[in-house]
């Protein structure tokens, strides 16, 4: 693996991206950068009246993510592998779900300016799963949010799939996690880690428990 590698693990709520990012970083001896869940002062208002407060809430998340990721520009990415669980481009995915057309247009102007000022990853690992699997994992976790329901998970999961189908700003490794637990299945994790170390171009779909990967879009 090249020493200049910057890897981002992404995926919808319930897919296990943070825990897998931690395990990959530990295995590679890498620097780990996790998304900061800063308290959004607009979120309570958004939960009461989405149409009125969505733009303020979404803009706060965007700026908070920018403040965190811009610090990567100050780190020496050429001397140490860095693994994160937060892709800056992903923030726009939630903006398209929450904002109306005019708000999205204004949001995009700010987003496009900021995006050029953060480091882009050398590899994105997109963890996908069926919606019913995500929903079950979320309900079984300690992190519960009664404002979320199955329909919301379905909308978010479909938005993630659309987003990464068109994603072309970095090499992309798509991993189906519906039927495997990479945290406890060392054999499958070893195969995945090898893909992370070697994938450098285009899009590749990695299917666990099979002998190889299905070729993706190049």
Image (cartoon, rainbow, N blue to C red):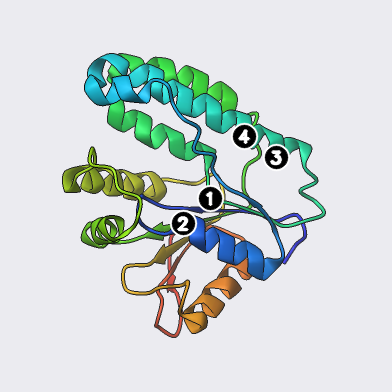
Q: CA distance from mark 1 to mark 3?
A: 13 Å
The residue lying furthest to the front in this view is: 142
- Using residue 111 as the reference point, say whether residue 73 is left or right of it: right
| Foreground disc of the pair 4, 3 | 4
Residue at the disc numbered 3: 72
Q: Are marks 4 and 2 in contact (CB under 8 Å)?
A: no
Residue at the disc numbered 2: 17
Q: Which residue occupies 17% across, 44% down?
A: 151
Q: CA distance from mark 2 to mark 1?
A: 6 Å
Q: CA distance from mark 4 to mark 2?
A: 18 Å
Q: Position of residue 12 (x, y in %)?
A: 37, 50
Q: Position of residue 58 (x, y in %)?
A: 40, 25
For the residue labelled by badge 2, is the local secondary structure a helix, a strand or a loop?
A: helix
Q: Are marks 4 and 1 in contact (CB under 8 Å)?
A: no
Of residues 8 and 13, the one drawn nearer to the viewer in this rendering: 13
- Using residue 184 as the reference point, say whether residue 75 is left or right of it: right
Within 10 Å of disc 4 (Cα), the crowding (few <14, some 14-19, many 20+) is some
Residue at the disc numbered 4: 68
- Using residue 54 as the reference point, say whether residue 77 is left or right of it: right
- Mark sitting earlier along the chain (2/1): 2
Of residues 174 and 190, the one drawn nearer to the viewer in this rendering: 190
Q: Are marks 2 and 3 in contact (CB under 8 Å)?
A: no
Q: Position of residue 88 (x, y in %)?
A: 53, 37
In this view, 89 is above or below 183: above
> How many marks overall?
4
- Using residue 134 as the reference point, say whether residue 83 is left or right of it: right
Residue at the disc numbered 1: 85
Q: Are marks 2 and 1 in contact (CB under 8 Å)?
A: yes
Q: Which residue occupies 42% across, 32% down?
A: 92
């Amino acid at each position: 693996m090249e020493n200049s590698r910057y890897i981002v693990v992404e995926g919808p709520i319930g897919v296990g991206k943070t825990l897998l990012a931690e395990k990959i970083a530990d295995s590679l001896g890498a620097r780990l950068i996790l998304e900061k869940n800063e308290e959004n002062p607009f979120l309570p208002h958004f939960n009461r009246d989405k149409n009125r407060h969505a733009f303020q809430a979404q803009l706060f998340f965007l700026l908070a993510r920018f403040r965190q990721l811009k610090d990567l520009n100050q780190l020496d990415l050429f001397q140490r592998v860095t693994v994160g669980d937060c892709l800056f481009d992903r923030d726009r995915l939630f903006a398209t779900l929450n904002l109306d057309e005019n708000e999205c247009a204004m949001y995009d102007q700010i987003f496009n300016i900021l995006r050029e000022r953060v480091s882009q990853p050398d590899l994105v690992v997109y963890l996908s799963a069926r919606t019913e699997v995500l929903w079950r994992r979320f309900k079984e976790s300690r992190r519960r949010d009664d404002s979320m329901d199955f329909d919301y998970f379905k909308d978010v999961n479909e938005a993630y799939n659309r987003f990464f189908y068109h994603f072309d700003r970095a090499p992309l490794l798509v991993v189906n996690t519906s039927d495997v637990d990479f945290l406890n299945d060392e054999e499958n994790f070893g195969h995945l880690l090898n893909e992370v170390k070697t994938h450098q171009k285009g899009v590749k779909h990695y299917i666990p428990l099979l002998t190889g990967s299905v070729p993706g879009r190049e």
